[in-house]
Amino acid sequence: MTQLERAAAGEISSEVTEVSKQEELDAELIQSRVASGKIVIPANKNRQSRTVGIGKGLRTKINASIGTSTEIIDMDMEIEKAKTAEKYGADTLMDLSVGGNIAKIRRAVMDAINLPIGTVPLYEAFAIAIEKYGAAVKMPAELLFEITERQCEEGVAFMAIHCGINRRTVEMLRKQNYRYGGLVSKGGSYMVAWMEHNQRENPLYEHFDRVVEILKKHDVVLSLGNGFRAGAIHDANDRVQIQELLINCELAELGRNAGCQTMVEGPGHIPINEIEASVLLEKKMSGESPFYMLGPITTDIAPGYDHITAAIGAALSSAYGADFICYVTPSEHLGLPFPEDVREGVIAARTAAHIGDMIKLKKTDTDKTMSKARRDMDWKTQFSLAIDPERAKEIKAKRGNGDEHTCTMCGKFCANDTLKGMFENDATGTDKQ
Ligand code: SF4
């Protein structure tokens, strides 16, 4: 049985208990939300990995995506990227390799770390088709299901599957007749090309029951892929994207009713004033399925700094209720990320998720403790609470003046030192911490 079915049957699984401990919430509450599909726990029966709950009332989780391209194939670097993501606090990792021996790289990554692993099985299916039949459009539909099943057996914990693309949405895209950013989803563009070439319906939509059956067998979370996501600010929330969201929300409910854990993916590129609507629509139309936001990137003009443009979007998304954030690295739109980009991306996404959680979950105690440690120049506490203590210590040490008490920002003009002892109480007049 899946986590969803077990929870619906009244069982509190060890994974539910673990999530309740991590989140400091009642196990019964977690169980009821897993049963209703508002929380998912990626826990493929075929691989032991860290337990992570994603969904309503839980800390916003972040995913780091790695993987080879056809231009850079370096398995050791992918392993280093995976370890970097785990070290700096990613909750999950997606291996999106499309170059080299995809299966071998995936297995090596899974052996190297303990995080739940996500994939897009369609990538491997299309890559095999290119190698074997000379073109992605020649892929036999059956291969999609074979690869999906094989990856489930290997222990992949969640899969982005592009079920929401169908003949009607492709027709809508054609009639719309514009897209400033085209289609930026690799899976989405390959699937549309396959459908157009073969004049056939998307097998993942047509045989959705089969997709659900395969994932359910291994308790893999079905993440309904965002193939028509906007790849430009000016395409955000256009008819095609909303149509795919609507279909994905409907499929999320159908999958859930069949006992499969499901979540829905969101954009993409989006201006900040449209993020709230995006989250609201997904939550209402799906019956509160967890919402997995990719980024989202909030301006198109900052290449080299897209971990920041995405962190702004991620903080707002999380505050409005998104549950899961896919990080973006500084190399977005420019090249394949290296390990140092992974670190930047993970820290930026974790920071954004925390900013969102301060509003969504009203969790502000850590910030209060940090503020007081800063006021009192308690560096040990400051470093222990920092999202990236290593970086904080490094900067303090590099720019030090030998005075461990203050720092070189103000030196002898240190405001905290000048008024030391004046502000020891909190707003109520008593120090509660
Ligand atoms: S020197 Fe300035 S920045 Fe550094 S601790 Fe004192 S007030 Fe803060």
Image (cartoon, grey):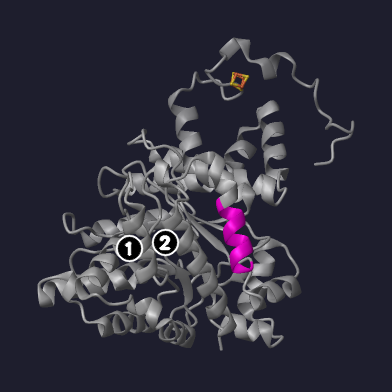
Residue under the image location 63 percent in, 54 percent down: 321
Q: Position of residue 11 (x, y in %)?
A: 69, 85
Instruction: Identify the image quadrant of the N terminus.
Output: bottom right
Looking at the image, can residue 330 be seen?
yes
Q: Splitting the image into 4 quarters, where does residue 352 fall?
A: top right
For marks 1 and 2, the one nearer the N-term is 1
Residue picked out by circle 2:
226
Q: Residue furthest left?
A: 134
Query: Would you say 257 lies left or right of 211 here?
Result: right
Work out whether 114 lies above or below 46: above
Q: Nearer the viewer, residue 425 or 37?
A: 37
User: Mark 1 and mark 2: span between their CA atoms?
Assistant: 8 Å
At 30% from the left and 85% from the top, the residue drawn is 146
Q: What range is drawn magenta here?
A: 278-287
Q: Are discs 1 and 2 less than 8 Å apart at CB?
A: yes
Q: Is residue 71 left or right of residue 385?
A: left
Q: Quadrant of residue 411?
A: top right
Magenta stretch contains residue 343: no
Three-letter amino acid code at the position of disc 2:
Asn
Q: Is residue 83 left or right of residue 392?
A: left
Which type of secondary structure does the marked residue at label 1 adopt?
helix
Does the Cβ of the disc 2 residue fall within 8 Å of ligand 1?
Answer: no
- Asked which secondary structure carries label 2, the reply is loop
Point out residue 266 in the picture as x, y percentages from the top left corner.
48, 57
**What amino acid type should be assigned to the residue bearing mark 1?**
Gly
- Position of residue 236 relative to residue 26, above or below, is above
Residue closer to the observer: 164 or 307: 164
Magenta-colored segment: predominant secondary structure: helix
Residue designated by label 1: 188
User: How many residues crowd mark 2 within 10 Å: few (<14), some (14–19), many (20+)?
Assistant: many
Residue 284 shown in magenta: yes
